[in-house]
Image (cartoon, rainbow, N blue to C red):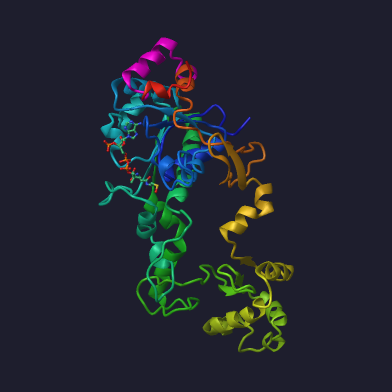
Amino acid sequence: MKALEGIKILDFTHVQSGPTCTQLLAWLGADVIKVERPGIGDITRGQLVDIPDVDSLYFTMLNSNKRSITLDTKNETGKEILIRLIKSCDVLVENFAPGALDRMGFPWERIQELNPRITYASVKGFGPGPYEDCKVYENVAQCTGGAASTTGFDDGPPLVTGAQIGDSGTGLNLAFGIVAALFQRVTSGRGQRVQAAMQDGVLNLARVKLRDQQRLAHGPLTEYPVNTDVDETPRAGNASGGGQPGWAVRTKGGGPNDYIYVIIQPPGWANYMELCGRPELVDDPEWSTPAARLPKLDKCFKIIEEWTLTKTKREAMDILNARDIPCGPILSMKEIADEPALRNTGTVVEVDHPTRGKYLTVGMPVKLSDSEAKVQSSPLLGEHTEEILLDVLGLSREEVNAAWNSGALGEPAAKTID
Ligand code: CAO
């Protein structure tokens, strides 16, 4: 038994933000029925292709544990099938461009009328306001949510991060909203509208920078390693966003990722200075307190780096942690892919795909003791079309054949059952 067993999700999502959300729900045990355009499917199936004629890793890593039905929702028979799906499902999730579902003939009012218990959940780039009609991709959200202006070095351009905080971050928010709506339905008996804007999701993750914007009104941000006599939160390089100073220092090896991020908590100073062969700085009033170190943090990290350069990042991690010093090696994706601990916990999983073979993907990032997430392959385009029509909607064989003949399901050549 899984946490969301028995819950049916009508998954109208594509690209990344929406699919992240429905993949999480699938890992929690929901039956996720992904509706895709006949012949084309989710655009990511054919993007960034590494093996010809095989679903891309972009797609397979966002759509595991789902079922796929091809349905042209602009075809009249397709619309009738969609109505039956809306009536049978608990949640409809979509991340089309603003207004697309309305243009298809399914505004929220109609969906609610068809099934008052359904929750209708959407990701859009922006909430209501001047940009509500705009299409949005990941980096647009990072820029408009405040992350890009506060990422990078002070003397360089704004930077986006490789972590997909706009897409996957908003997918998480939407999943959380859907689970809450399903919980509320237990008492209210009604579904509800759940909306998550990517700009809001990014800002929520960048809140410490909005904190610093307000602190600027009361003087410079003394922990920033740059001039903060300015009126907008500046970019702070690798400085810590928290109350304890931190920096990425180099380690032995000289490779692009031979670095370790070290944090100087007040009690850690003595340990660092003993390791670094500078015991005289432990009690020196010019160095011994956080306030004394603040104006010369660059010098502090230089001293630490002279020591870390004599160790590999893994050695430094072990030695520092043995002394209770928080730190973390900069791990490359190659190292993460090979990390046994991440495989053991199911955070990185190897999956077998019918046409691709074995590939690595991420697993459930939250672990539930009574609802284990078993990651399975993503579906082929339309793999479950007939199974869904027959078993979920209870259509007869004749009705299914009529749907094929109407063109609503795509080319009859795509039939998977005779
Ligand atoms: N049958 C028939 N038509 C279908 C269909 C189906 N099964 N599935 C989709 N369509 C149609 C839609 O109805 C829409 O038609 P209209 O333009 O006539 O309304 C059309 O396909 C394209 O949908 P779209 O506008 O959402 O797709 P796009 O590629 O042009 O835009 C994106 C992509 C992501 C920019 C846009 O969907 C968007 O802004 N979404 C919200 C924000 C979001 O989630 N962004 C994150 C994406 S991940 O980086």
Residue 209 picture location, percent across and down:
43, 65
Front-most of residues 301 and 314 = 314
Q: Is residue 80 in the magenta section?
A: no
Residue 348 picture location, percent across and down:
61, 48
Quadrant of the rendered structure where residue 334 is?
bottom right
Quadrant of the rendered structure where residue 372 is?
top right
Q: Is residue 404 left or right of residue 310?
A: left
Q: Is residue 400 in the magenta section?
A: yes
Q: Is residue 180 visible?
A: no
Quadrant of the rendered structure where residue 411 is?
top left
Q: In which quarter of the image is ligand 1?
A: top left
Q: Is residue 405 above or below residue 136?
A: above
Magenta stretch mostly in which secondary structure? helix
Q: Is residue 186 left or right of residue 412?
A: right
Front-most of residues 270 and 76 = 76
Q: Tally the numbered discs.
A: 0
User: Which residue reaches farthest front?
Assistant: 52
Front-most of residues 162 and 270 = 162
Residue 242 picture location, percent across and down:
53, 68
Q: In this view, does 409 lie to the left or right of 163?
A: left
Q: Residue at x 63, y 36 (%)?
A: 371
Q: Identify the image quadrant of the N terminus.
A: top right
Front-most of residues 232 and 256 = 256
Q: Is residue 118 visible?
A: yes
Q: Is residue 171 left or right of residue 407?
A: right
Give the magenta-colored segment's residue range: 391-410
User: Which residue reaches farthest right?
Assistant: 322
Q: In this view, does 401 lie above or below 272?
A: above
